[in-house]
Image (cartoon, rainbow, N blue to C red):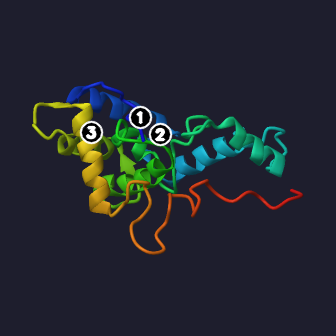
Amino acid sequence: MGDPMGDKTVTRAEAEAKAREVFARLDVNHDGKIDKADREAKMAEHFKMIDTDGNGSISQAEFMASHERKPRGGKGMDHKMGGPEGGMHEGMHEGMGGGKRGAMMGYVMLRMADANKDGAVSRDEFVAAALAHFDKADANHDGKVTPEERKAAMKAMHERMGHDRMGGMKGKGGMRGMHGPMGDGPPPPPPGN
């Protein structure tokens, strides 16, 4: 897994600005919070992208074509909303990894950001969580996170969460990826749809 930030050192101010930018993008209905309504709107957008003939259902051909359009690494179609909660990976965890692991990480981080546990994440909660994550990665507390600090923070997080080097859970029968045993996303629709 490469570092999407490359060799860039990121300041705390840049991290805060990026978190605000990402929050604005994830707040699909612009009501000042990320919640179920935003997830549903994002899922509807995603469905519409796959349903290329606009008939309200996704055929096997449309499903397969959507996966062919997506380059390896998940940067094709907009997968930024991730799992049921999704999106936090993009904002709080950006520069620390990506792909399918990011979707699960996004889910976990979004739940953690919901400080008042009301099922929604406000902009203030989102930015505070992003900055807390930044501060944790800033090992020498100089207000900057270097590529080395990002790698060390990612390694430490994976160790805390019990992940192996491949991103799967350690232990017998553990999940090998975040979207199923093959890490390929959901299974295809039944033939003939």
Q: Which residue, given by chain and number where applicable, does mark 3 sit on? A: 150
Amino acid type shown at disc 3: Arg
Determine contact: label 2, label 1, CB under 8 Å: yes
First in sequence: mark 2 or mark 3?
A: 2
Crowding near the residue tagged with mark 2, few <14, some 14–19, many ≥20 C-alpha atoms within 10 Å:
many
Q: Nearer the viewer, mark 2 or mark 3?
A: 3
Graded by Cα atoms within 10 Å as few (under 14), some (14 to 19) or many (20 or more), the crowding at tag 1 reads many
Residues 14 and 128: in front is 14
Residue 8, above or below 45: above
Check whether the beta carbons of the residues at disc 2 and disc 3 lie within 8 A of each other: no
CA–CA distance in space, label 2 to label 1: 6 Å
**Residue type marked 2:** Leu
Residue 97 in sight = yes
Secondary structure of the residue carrying numbered label 1: helix
| Residue at horizontal 56 percent and vertical 42 percent from the top | 79
Q: Which mark is residue 26?
A: 2
Q: Is residue 142 left or right of residue 61?
A: left
Q: Which residue is mark 1?
A: 22
Residue at the (64%, 58%) spot, across then down? 186
Residue 108's spot in the image, x, y percent?
Answer: 38, 57
